[in-house]
Amino acid sequence: MFSKLMAVNEQLNEAYLNENKGYTIALIGNPNVGKSTVFNALTGMHQHTGNWPGKTVALARGSFLHHQKSHEMIDLPGTYSLLAHSREEEVTRDYICFSPCDVCVVVCDSTCLERNLNLVLQTLEITDKVVVCANLCDEANKKNIIIHKEKLEQALGVEVVLMSARSAVGLDELKEAVMRCGMKKGDTHRPPVDYSPMIEQAITHISKVIQKKQLQERFIAIKLLEGNQQFYQCVKNKEAVQTIVEQEIKQLKNGGVYDQLEDSIVDAINQKALHIANECITYQQADYYEKDRKIDRIVTHKVWGILLMIALLGLIFWITISAANVPSELLTDGFHIIEGKLNTWFHEIGMNETVRAILMDGVYKTSAWVISVMLPPMAIFFPLFTILEDFGYLPRVAFNLDGYFRKAKACGKQALTMSMGFGCNAVGVSGCRIIDSPRERLIAILTNNFVPCNGRYPTLIAIITMFFAGMLAAPWSGIVSALLLTGTILLGIILTFWVSSLLSMTLLKGVPSAFTLELPPYRKPQFAKVIVRSIFDRTLFVLGRAISVAIPAGALIWLFANITIQDQTLLVIISDFLDPFARQLGLDGVILLAFILGFPANEIVVPIIIMAYMSSSYMMEMDNLTAIKDLLVSNGWTWITAVCTMLFSLIHFPCATTLWTIKKETGSWKWTALSFVIPTAVGMIICFLVSHIAGLFM
């Protein structure tokens, strides 16, 4: 009965929406212009996300009510140009060119409107159903930038709305402008772009054979010169169009224009955008951006920029290390209390002892350890990282490292995906979508694991504190730990460059591609939104994945520690078997087995080592690092063991979550397997060399 009522309710809702259906609105814009803020301000909670069919590109849809109509808004991926070079840009281009869109809202940054106008002009060559949203007008006012709205509307031939989406200024005006734009009939007025004569001639010839009115646009004709196959499916006389295109391409090649086609188009559009900006924008403070440029002279300096990046990295790690201890202890205490109550309840209901042990000593203890050790650092690291992103610093990091990645024949955007890997390698792998070249994207995916994620920090920090910084008093202990951790991570970055270069010379040969990187203006971070976004979009997402693989891992670890063969547990049997090989790497069988069993989640490596050394049947946690160090030393650990364990923790196979993400992103078991083999082989070679060279001096 209830399901029938739900079905009727859905039918009524669908009928209501069809009857009150408004416009379909596409939202486009450059990155860092506040496009998502505009989308969220308009749609509120009436939105959902998914993937474009056949593409791993996020799609956000939302709706809002205005004039008793439900308008659908589609937030397209950010792009600098409709001359697409990536999957995200292809999605935006194809939707604007070929999908039934009633209104297109182009979001621009009012503080650098001249840079955004090229996308406006490209869009206007496809459709006149455009509304220009000049966002961040509050920041423009602070910098004494005056946008002459009427002049700009006259130059572009469409409505312009000045707004600040963060403070909800201009939202009503934007809604009204969208309504007027949707109702207006086709307008022939367009700001003319002066292309070269040969391109204009090619456009004219192609346009003559296009029969569909909505496709008789100059920019579409230009895209045909690049062989956009989707366009051919949209015209009736497909063969005639293809023939004309082939002829025009031949003419352009003979005239020496085709090879510089895109540059010629971009230059013409940029010239028109600059002309409009000069006519419609007044800078009362001519050096309004000088403050940003002064900061950039240091931040992007070849020497000081790198040193500042290292210092900020060390500061973030110091804050993360220092601040994570207290919440970790509180979570641990809380889980101990819950554990006691659950054990009491299980005994009261008469649960089978083996089942209780698997659930509590295996699954519960493993999951509790992952949460208490992983959650606090992530909850601190991700907001700090997002603040740097919001402030505008991360594009400067990519700028600083671009030269190094280009020397490795990789892409400078890899600096951003590598930075994401500091929080979680799975997130870093997903972030590799921003890299346009498939070859360079694969290099970034295969090398992302060389920087440690939050799951490996506990092992690194514990070993650093116990063997190298523990004898120092606070706050020096935390400072030295942060410095040593930063040095370890710098080694991971150096290895990223080296392995990227090696892959570029072997498996993934190629020439590094150029990319457009805009250095956005420095902005005051929106701290409340930063916290919400980093906690929900990153921290809880990553934690959920970690727990999903930690639960079966906990049961497996318990079985290894409790199944006995000839009075020896599987844990002891396997660690003894691995011991001779592990000794060659400066480790022992227990350490190597702990890394293998820690495959689902790196956080559980140390507890497994403690459990194996204490011959316990469940995961152990000791009260302090001094007790753990005494246990390790009594089982043969030296400073060489500590160093090699740190190195192998830094350089070994990705966790299960990351490998799952790699398989999803690449769609290939081959590249997934290589992403496992490459860092593991490098880690073993380095540990072997370090242990044997250091052994010569012992």
Image (spheres, rainbow, N blue to C red):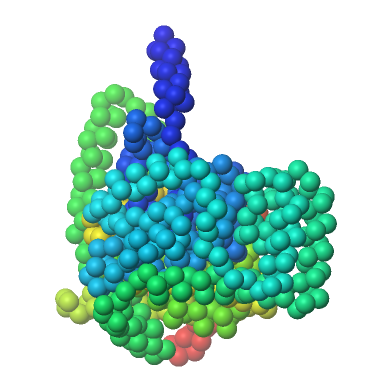
Identify which residue is drawn at 40% across, 43% down: 180
Of 126 and 655, the residue lying toward us: 126
Q: Is residue 467 visible?
A: no
In this rendering, would 247 be left or right of 152? right
Dividing the picture into quadrants, the one containing residue 87 is bottom right
**Which quadrant holds residue 416?**
bottom left
Q: Position of residue 32 (x, y in %)?
A: 39, 63
Q: Is residue 514 visible?
A: yes
Which of the two residues, 163 or 520, is positioned nearer the viewer here? 163
Against 469, residue 184 (above or below) is: above
Q: Residue at x 35, y 51 (%)?
A: 38
Quarter holding the N terminus? top left
Number of numbered markers: 0
- Residue placed furthest toward the left: 474
Instruction: Give residue 126's quadrant in the image.
Output: bottom right
In percent of the image, x 42 and y 18: which residue is there? 12
Q: Nearer the viewer, residue 486 or 169?
A: 169
Where is residue 272 shown, x and y percent of the image?
51, 71
Image spot of residue 652 (x, y percent) = 51, 66
Relative vertical location of residue 342 with respect to residue 467 in this rendering, above or below:
above
Along the line of sight, which residue is nearer the eye, 239 or 656? Answer: 239
Q: Is residue 369 left or right of residue 640?
A: left
Task: Report the quarter where the C terminus lies.
Answer: bottom left
- List x then y, in percent, for residue 179: 39, 41
684 lies left or right of 19 = right
> Looking at the picture, does residue 294 appear above or below residue 40?
below
Which residue extends farthest top?
1
In screen coordinates, is 579 left or right of 6?
right
Q: Residue at x 46, y 74 (%)?
A: 274
